[in-house]
Amino acid sequence: MGWVMMSERELNRVEILAQVDVARLSEDNAANMLALTRRQVFRLLKRYRPNDASAIRTKLRGRAPNNQIHTAKRD
């Protein structure tokens, strides 16, 4: 596996999800720490377990936003 660029927020999520995965932290506590619901924590865990940390990274990094104004129209 190569390098994965992640923000501080994403790194924090990975650390907390790793603790939940090895049963050092409960899902409820993780939800409180991440300011998410239990359901969202379970969704993150579902992505994290098979793919490790790279699954938590946002999928839109490096792409243009959907609401970007075309350059000709902007000018």
Image (tube, rainbow, N blue to C red):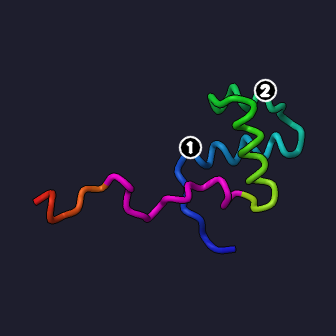
Q: Where is residue 9 in the image (x, y as percent from the top left)?
A: 56, 43
Write the start and end of the magenta stretch as one range.
53-67
Locate residue 23 relative to residue 2 in the image: left or right: right
Predominant SS of the magenta segment: loop
Kindly report the distance in space between the C-alpha atoms of the residues bearing marks 2 and 1: 19 Å
Locate residue 69 relative to residue 36 in the image: left or right: left
Q: Mark 2 points at which residue?
A: 28
**Closest to the observer: 8 or 71?**
71
Q: Where is residue 56 in the image (x, y as percent from the top left)?
A: 65, 53
Q: Classify residue 35 by image quadrant.
A: top right
The disc placed on residue 9 is 1
**Closest to the observer: 69 or 21?**
69
Query: In this picture, is 3 found above or below 56?
Result: below
Q: Position of residue 47 (x, y in %)?
A: 74, 53
Q: Which residue lies furthest to the front in this view?
A: 73
**Label 2: how many residues lie within 10 Å, few (<14), some (14-19) or many (20+)?**
some
Three-letter amino acid code at disc 1? Arg
* Identity of the residue drawn at 33% across and 52% down: 67
Disc 1 is placed on an element classified as: helix
Locate residue 5 relative to residue 62 in the image: left or right: right
